[in-house]
Image: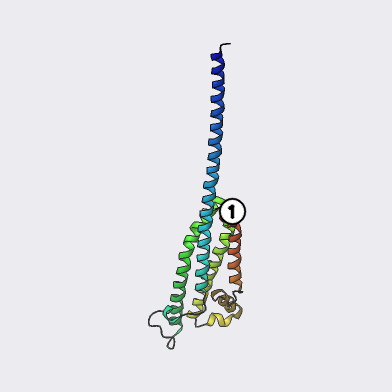
Amino acid sequence: MDIGVYIGIVKDITLSIAAGITAWVAYTGLNKWKKELRGKIDFDTAHALIKATYKVRDELKYARSPFIPAHEFPKGYDSFNKNSEKEGDAYAFIYSNRMKQVFDATQDFDIRALEAEALWGSKIKEYTQELRICYRQLNISFEAYIRNKYSGNVTFESDRNFKEKIEQDIWVSLEEDDSLSIRIKDAIKKIEQEIHSYLDKK
């Protein structure tokens, strides 16, 4: 056989091998790039979610502060000259302003939670939903407290157990060992544990 044919065959084989190696390198590089991109997406999503979670936590704690400074009361409110309607209006003003800060924080939290659910599935949704339940519970308890003020405290006087439950919800205890504080902390801990591995990817 002509040596030129051998050279042609060797050349073809060499080109085939080179093409195969190039394809393998490209495929490997693409997979590595995809993993790095996914790792970055997971990290960014986890980071945004935990920041939003802590913002909700902080706003909930502020909203539940038992101390109400004078500037939080509506302008012209006289604590020494009040009736049930004025008192109801005053506390409705205070707690609606506090809950506005909570709801503003939860809007961002809800967006971040949906992004996380799209990436990681139903488990993270279960944990973020637990935190949502906490701030909805607080809002309901604020509403009950305000209704009691409008009633001239009749509601609480007729049901002391209900009074204690509502007050435990709306006022965080010094040690944060009340039932709602514990529920909030448990919900946050579950979120932290679920996203911990994604934060370690960076």
Q: Quadrant of residue 13?
A: top right
Q: Nearer the viewer, residue 43 or 175?
A: 43
Question: What count of labels does the image hold?
Answer: 1
Residue that carries the numbered disc 1 in the rendered image: 122
Image vertical order of residue 8 relative to residue 164, above or below: above
x and y percentages locating residue 100 in the rendered image: 45, 69
Q: Position of residue 176 (x, y in %)?
A: 59, 74
Q: Residue at x 56, y 74 (%)?
A: 169
Residue toward you, 133 or 43: 43
Query: Which residue occupies 52% across, 59% down?
Result: 49
Residue located farthest toward the bottom when viewing the structure as drawn = 80
* Residue occupying the far top of the picture: 1
What's under tag 1, amino acid-wise? Answer: Ser
Q: Is residue 196 visible?
A: yes
Q: Quadrant of residue 5?
A: top right
Q: Quadrant of the N terminus?
A: top right
